Amino acid sequence: MDIYCLAISPDDVTIKLFQEFKVKLRDRLKRPYGSENSLAHITLIFFVANEATYHLILSEFRQILSKLMPFRVSLSDFKDFQPNPECTFYASPDEY
């Protein structure tokens, strides 16, 4: 069994803004951190599958997501998952 992550990506302008922010954050921290090389994205779900079932699950996700209309997400805070040098920083979405 393998662990997979389903995520959505923002537009190129937002990706570039987050890349610039991550450089500034690394410079300010004066050290690397765990998520500094990842592209901007929003993780929707992690799931477990094997090679035999992965394509079936992916097909289900595609069918469900193809019916969704684009939507706006507002991010208003920065947080981290772990208070250690390898932590992952993230922009926290507004709660509705």
Image (cartoon, helix red, strand yellow):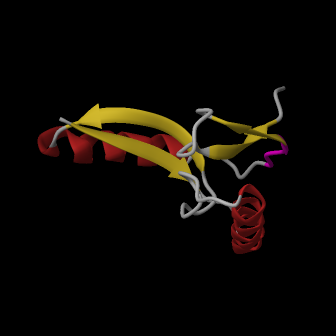
Quick check: 17 above or below 35? Answer: below
Residue 22: in magenta span: no
Image quadrant containing the N terminus: top left
Compared to residue 24, the image places residue 34 above or below, namely above
Q: Which residues are magenta?
A: 72-76
Which one is in front, 69 or 2? 2
Residue that appears at 58% across and 37% down: 84
Identity of the residue drawn at 19% across and 39% down:
53
Q: Position of residue 21 (x, y in %)?
A: 77, 64
Q: Is residue 74 magenta?
A: yes
Report x, y in % for residue 40: 63, 59
x, y percent for residue 13: 76, 73
Residue 32 in picture, x, y percent from top left: 58, 59
Q: Residue at x 84, y 45 (%)?
A: 74
Which SS does the magenta portion mostly show? loop
Quadrant, the C terminus:
top right
Which residue is found at the position 34% from the left and 46% from the top? 58
- Using the image as rendered, state which of residue 73 and residue 22 is in the foreground: 22
Q: Quadrant of residue 37?
A: bottom right
Q: Residue furthest left?
A: 52
Q: Quadrant of residue 49?
A: top left
Q: Nearer the viewer, residue 12 or 24?
A: 24
